[in-house]
Image (cartoon, helix red, strand yellow):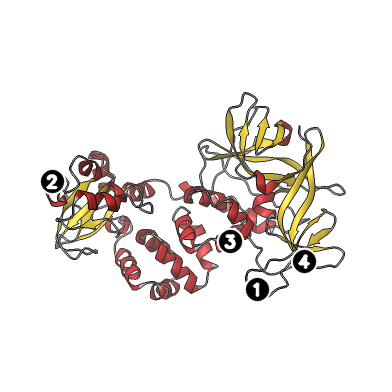
C-alpha cells in the first residue's frame, strides 16, 4: 500500500475498484475513532455502491489509496452503513469545525484532514489543514492557512453554528434525493448546519425529498424571510404540505411573506382535502394555447428544471393561461408531438380519450386512473371546466407509500441510535443525535 499522505477531502467521489479492475462504488466519507494517547485511527470508508446504498468498507480491506482511486480486496459487506458509537465521519463532521491552538495563538477552521499509513493496513490522522480568521476587511480576503498536528489543537468552545461550507461543496454533484438522504444520516445539529449553508433553490429541492418532521425541523431554524424564500422555490403542492404541518400563526406569517402568486397557489391547495386530487395536485403544469405549435410545445418541455412527470404532456386551454385557466381543451403528450412536424398546431393533436378529474376525486381513484391508462399525469378541472392543476405519478406514489418511506432502506431492519464521540473536535450532542435517529425510522446494521 502506498505510504503517501492522503487528504480526505480529495477522496470524496473517488472511485473504488476491486482487484480485477471492476468499479465497486465511490467514496463518500472516511471514518475515524479517537484513541487515548495516539493519533485518531482510520477504521474504514463509507462507500456508495450501485443503488445509492452506502456501505462500510473496513480499512483492512483497502489495499491501495492514491492517484484518485482506491483498490480493495473485493470483499465488501453490502449491509447498509450504520455509524457506531465513537466513530467520527471526517467529511460530514470534521470539515468546517472550529479549533483553537493549544499554544494560544488563536482559532482556526478545519478545511481538510490528512491521513497516512502508520503500518500495513493501519491508517491514522496525520495533520489538519486549517485556515485562520481573515485579518483584512476586504470581502475577497481570506485568512492564512497552516498545517497542524492533532495534538496542536483542541476543541474551540462556541455557541455559534459550525461552518458547513466545506461539506456542502463536497455534496454539490448529488441529486436532491441523494442529498436529502445524506442529511438524514447526519446528527441533528450537523444536519441543520448543512441545510443552512444550502442556497434557497437547492434547499427547496432537498426539502421536497425529506420526511415532514425533518422539513419542519429545518424550516424552524430559518428566519421568516428566508423560510418564505425557500417556500417560493418549492413546488406549490410540496409547499402546501409543509405549511400545513406548521402552526397556524407561522404558516399565515410565511404566506404573507411569500410572492403573492406563489402564496395564492398554496392557499388554494390548502383549501382541498389532503387525500383528494386537489390536495395532491400541482398548480404548475405546462399550459399553452390551441394555436401554439409542436415546436413551441417541445421547447417548453425540454427545460432542465422541469420535473419529468410534468414534461410528459402539455395542457391546452383558452386564456388565461394560469390556473384557474380558461376552459380546458385537452392534453397533448410529448410522444404525439414527436410524430408531427414543428409547425403543427397543438389544438389539432388533443388526446380525446382522456377525461379530466375534479379536485374532489379521491386519491385512491386518481391512482386507479393512472394505473388503468398507463398515465404519468392527469388534469384537474373545476366545476366551470377550468384547469386548476395536474396530479402526477410521483404525487400519487407519495400518497400510496408509507409516511416514513423516505427513512427506510432496502432492508427492513431498524436504524439504531448513533452515539457520537464526546472528545476531540466538537460533534453534535450524543443524546440529541440518538433521539433523532431513533425517531426517524429504519436503517440496517453494518454486520
Indicate the position of residue 413 as horizontal and vertical percent values: 56, 39
Q: Is residue 398 visible?
A: yes
Task: Give the quadrant of residue 431.
Answer: bottom right
In this orientation, which residue lies closer to the viewer: 130 or 215?
A: 130
The numbered mark, 3 or 1, whose residue comes first in the sequence reads 1
Which quadrant of the rendered structure holds the C terminus? top right
Mark 1: few/some/many CA within 10 Å (<14, 14-19, 20+): few
Task: Give the quadrant of residue 5.
Answer: top right
In this orientation, which residue lies closer to the viewer: 373 or 126?
A: 126
Q: Is residue 84 visible?
A: no
Relative placement, left or right, of 282 versus 134 is: left
Mark 3: few/some/many CA within 10 Å (<14, 14-19, 20+): many
Reading the image, the residue beneath label 4 is 107
Q: CA distance from mark 4 to mark 3?
A: 23 Å
In this orientation, which residue lies closer to the viewer: 356 or 17?
A: 17
Q: CA distance from mark 2 to mark 1?
A: 64 Å
Q: CA distance from mark 2 to mark 4?
A: 69 Å
**Residue appearing at x 58%, y 32% in the figure:** 24
* Looking at the image, residue 75 lies above or below residue 361: above
Q: CA distance from mark 3 to mark 1?
A: 29 Å
* Looking at the image, residue 366 lies above or below residue 230: above
Reading the image, the residue beneath label 1 is 138
The numbered mark, 4 or 1, whose residue comes first in the sequence reads 4
Reading the image, the residue beneath label 3 is 192
Q: Report the mark closest to the observer, 3 or 2.
A: 2
Q: Report the mark closest to the observer, 2 or 4.
A: 4
Secondary element under disc 3, as helix, strand or loop, is helix
**Residue appearing at x 32%, y 49% in the figure:** 302
Reading the image, the residue beneath label 2 is 352
Relative placement, left or right, of 8 versus 202 is: right
Amino acid at each position: 500500500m502506498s505510504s503517501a499522505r492522503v487528504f480526505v477531502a480529495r477522496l470524496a467521489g473517488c472511485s473504488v475498484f476491486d482487484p480485477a479492475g471492476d468499479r465497486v462504488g465511490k467514496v463518500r466519507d472516511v471514518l475515524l475513532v479517537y484513541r487515548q494517547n495516539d493519533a485518531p485511527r482510520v477504521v474504514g470508508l463509507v462507500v456508495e455502491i450501485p443503488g445509492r446504498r452506502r456501505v462500510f468498507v473496513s480499512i483492512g480491506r483497502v489495499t491501495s489509496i492514491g492517484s484518485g482511486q482506491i483498490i480493495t480486496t473485493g470483499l465488501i459487506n453490502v449491509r447498509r452503513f450504520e455509524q457506531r458509537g465513537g466513530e467520527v465521519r471526517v467529511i460530514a463532521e470534521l470539515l468546517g469545525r472550529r479549533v483553537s491552538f493549544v499554544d494560544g495563538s488563536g482559532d482556526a477552521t478545519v478545511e481538510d484532514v490528512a491521513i497516512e499509513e502508520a503500518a500495513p493496513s493501519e491508517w491514522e490522522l496525520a495533520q489538519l489543514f486549517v485556515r485562520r480568521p481573515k485579518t483584512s476587511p476586504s470581502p475577497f480576503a481570506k485568512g492564512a492557512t497552516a498545517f497542524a498536528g492533532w495534538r496542536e489543537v483542541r476543541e474551540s468552545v462556541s455557541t455559534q453554528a459550525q461552518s458547513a461550507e466545506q461539506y456542502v461543496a463536497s455534496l454539490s454533484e448529488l441529486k436532491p434525493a441523494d442529498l436529502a438522504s445524506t442529511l438524514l444520516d447526519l446528527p441533528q445539529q450537523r444536519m441543520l448546519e448543512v441545510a443552512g449553508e444550502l442556497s434557497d433553490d437547492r434547499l427547496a429541492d432537498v426539502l421536497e425529498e425529506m420526511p415532514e418532521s425533518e422539513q419542519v425541523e429545518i424550516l424552524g431554524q430559518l428566519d421568516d424571510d428566508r423560510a418564505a424564500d425557500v417556500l417560493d422555490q418549492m413546488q406549490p403542492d410540496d409547499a402546501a404540505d409543509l405549511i400545513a404541518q406548521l402552526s397556524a400563526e407561522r404558516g399565515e406569517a410565511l404566506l404573507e411573506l411569500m410572492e403573492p402568486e406563489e402564496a395564492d397557489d398554496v392557499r388554494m391547495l390548502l383549501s382541498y382535502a389532503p387525500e383528494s386530487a386537489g390536495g395532491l395536485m400541482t398548480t404548475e403544469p405546462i399550459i399553452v394555447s390551441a394555436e401554439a405549435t409542436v415546436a413551441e410545445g417541445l421547447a417548453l418541455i425540454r427545460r432542465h428544471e422541469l420535473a419529468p412527470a410534468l414534461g410528459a404532456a402539455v395542457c391546452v386551454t383558452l386564456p388565461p393561461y394560469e390556473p384557474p385557466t380558461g376552459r380546458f381543451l385537452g392534453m397533448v403528450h410529448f410522444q404525439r408531438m414527436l410524430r408531427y412536424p414543428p409547425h403543427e398546431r397543438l389544438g389539432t393533436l388533443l388526446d380525446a380519450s382522456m377525461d379530466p378529474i375534479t379536485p374532489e376525486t379521491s386519491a385512491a381513484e386518481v391512482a386507479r386512473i393512472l394505473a388503468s391508462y398507463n398515465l404519468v399525469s392527469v388534469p384537474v378541472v373545476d366545476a366551470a371546466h377550468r384547469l386548476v392543476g395536474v396530479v402526477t405519478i410521483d404525487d400519487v406514489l407519495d400518497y400510496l407509500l408509507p409516511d416514513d418511506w423516505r427513512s427506510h432502506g432496502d432492508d427492513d431492519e431498524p436504524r439504531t441510535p448513533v452515539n457520537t464521540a464526546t472528545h476531540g473536535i466538537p460533534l453534535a450532542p450524543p443524546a440529541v443525535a440518538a433521539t433523532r435517529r431513533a425517531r426517524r425510522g429504519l436503517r440496517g446494521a453494518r454486520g
